[in-house]
Amino acid sequence: MLIDSLMIIYISIITTYYILVNATGLAINLYCKRFDVKRTEDYQPMVSVVMSCFNEGETVYNTIKSMRHSDYPVDKLEILAFDDCSQDDSFDWMLKAQQDFPHVIARKNKINQGKAHNVLAAVSISQGEVIVSIDSDCIFDPKAIKELVSCFTEPKIAAVGGRVGVRNANVNWLTRFQTIAYALSFLVIKSPEKIFRKIQCLSGPLVAIRRDCFNEIKEEIANRNFLGIKITNGEDRALTQMLLLKGYDTYLNIDALCYTTVPVSLAQYTKQQLRWRRSAIGQYFQAAISLPKMIVNSGILSTLFSIMPIFVLLAWNMLVITSWLAGKVIFTMMAIVLCHFAFGPCIVLAFYYYTRQSKQWDLKNISLFDLLFCRLLAAFWYPVSTIVITLFAIFTLDDGGWVTRESAELPLNAET
């Protein structure tokens, strides 16, 4: 039957992508270090760290403190912290940081604007040759800034991202799951993109951009929309894609580290994934529209890694539709779970071997049991996430705001 043939095609797309990305990423990490960017510590320009905050409380002070304790020269590092109408004492902690540490500027918005506009406002009064955008709930390794800046050794590299680890990894099963997911994402999934200098999404918690490159896209950031719908989420992915479409390169330095606090409840986690998915959908389809330009600027192989997530998302949703038409939804979902169980252990063992060989100290805490346990959870979570969250995200693209915060939220552009 046609429907059965389509189901086989969709399952093949999903499985092939899963195996290809993981196997390629692990092989690159183990055997292709020669493709890494050559770094230099001689380049030490003025750096402006910009940060947007909403309802972080004392956490924002600890974030600024960890950044201010960077081993980068004190007189070449300024921090600009913007409070986006927090309803708690976040701004008081910002003012304390401004008092306690040198070269810290704290500002509070009169209206809620969202991260993108806060970053634009901070950049407009900054002095740095390199702009470093950070999240307000992270703790930074002292070497993070130096590691980011050291990678600007190739003229085409416009932006360099760091690796995000998890501070609260051992709270419960969900935080352990996210710890593994973060590690796999930064150390495996993004590795093929590193070779081409075409990282598709430099993570928002820690990313450095040349000022002149940022200036080329700031109007696009300010006016970002999808099919006329204003988008306020996912600035990191959007910014990265804008730079790539300009013909620039992007890179990931896994030695530039920061640590974030991840959701501890399923409700919080789902909200976070929904926010990320809204951003991804807009950018994925924007990438499809810009396909000819992507091929010219990035090459065929890099473009393939860029657009494959689009086809996988579509394949997941088409798989549900076709299996529903054939009356085989439960059978199909079980088949997908079994595919995870069949190939998952191979990926787990390979990644475990990599963690033992790696110089990344935080990977040593990841046990083989944690990896197998998280692979089991992923087998059930990813089908639900890819289908349900994707569909909900499509119908709520115009829903802005800081959806991961538990405190009462102001509507976009609401008066304080």
Image (cartoon, grey):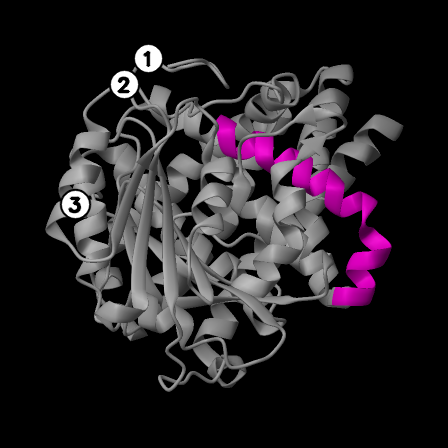
Measured as percent of width and height from the top left, residue 118 is found at 45, 38
For residue 216, side relative to residue 115 (left or right): right
Image quadrant holding the C terminus, namely top left
Residue type beneath disc 3:
Ala
For residue 167, side relative to residue 195 (left or right): left
Q: Work out whether residue 287 or residue 152 is closer to the camera in this orientation and state it.
A: 152
Q: What residue do we see at 44% from left, 38% from top?
A: 378
Q: CA distance from mark 2 to mark 3?
A: 18 Å
Q: What residue do we see at 66% from left, 36% from top?
A: 224
Whether 152 is drawn above or below 415: the answer is below
For residue 244, side relative to residue 157 (left or right): right
Q: Are marks 1 and 2 in contact (CB under 8 Å)?
A: yes
Look at the image and give the residue range highlighted in magenta.
Answer: 274-297
First of labels 2, 3 by sequence position: 2
Measured as percent of width and height from the top left, residue 30 is found at 44, 76
Q: Work out whether residue 23 or residue 280 is closer to the camera in this orientation and state it.
A: 280
Q: Secondary structure at mark 3?
A: helix
First of labels 1, 2 by sequence position: 2
